[in-house]
Image (cartoon, rainbow, N blue to C red):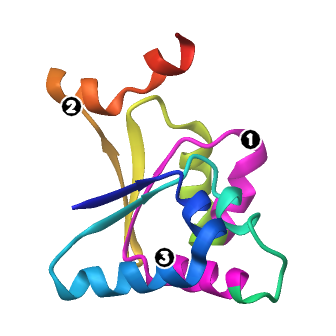
Amino acid sequence: LQVIDEAWAAVRHGARHFQAAIKLSRTFGVSTWLICHRPADLTAQSDDGTATAKISAGLLSDVQTRIIFRQPPDQVNTAAELFGLSERERDWVATMVRGRALWRLQRRGAVVHTVLTDAERQVCDTDRSMSA
């Protein structure tokens, strides 16, 4: 498992290398998880029409499983556009409670409520370090 938090930074600093690493990781059975907090971060790292913009778009289209948590109002339309959300999914992404996410597996979607164990919470909960 390869987890890349703040994926926008990896795209910005070496899109071609990042793309190759992700594609090659599948050869070795490695699952890659790209994490970004705002969908617009992925597309804001390059000018339209550039190689980096095309690589970012390609990475988004290659992703088969997308887990989308609630988005702030100014990000909902961007998320809907980038991830091809239906109107119903768009509404879910705008209003879900903490812990719920829209899981998109190819073209199918479901709302899933995530329940973390204490050990998982220590790894995943970054709120404490952000407010410390």
| 3 and 1 marks in contact (CB < 8 Å) | no
Q: Which mark is residue 99?
A: none
Toward which corner of the image does residue 116 lie, by quadrant?
top left
Going 53% across and 51% down the picture, which residue do you hit?
A: 6
Position of 99 with respect to 130 (left or right) is left
Q: How many marks?
A: 3
The x, y position of residue 44, in whole percent, is 76, 63
Secondary structure beneath dot 2 equals: helix
Q: CA distance from mark 3 to mark 1?
A: 30 Å
Mark 2 or mark 1: name the one nearer the start of the chain.
1
The foreground one among 118 and 98 is 118
Query: Is residue 132 visible from the viewing direction of this image?
Result: yes
Q: Which residue is mark 3?
A: 18
The x, y position of residue 75, in whole percent, is 72, 49
Q: Which residue is mark 2?
A: 120
Q: Residues within 10 Å of mark 2 (few under 14, many from 20)?
A: few
Identified by mark 3, the residue type is: Phe
| Magenta span of residues | 52-81
The x, y position of residue 19, in whole percent, is 48, 82
Query: Is residue 88 visible from the viewing direction of this image?
Result: no
The x, y position of residue 101, in whole percent, is 41, 46
Q: Which mark is residue 73?
A: 1
Identified by mark 1, the residue type is: Pro
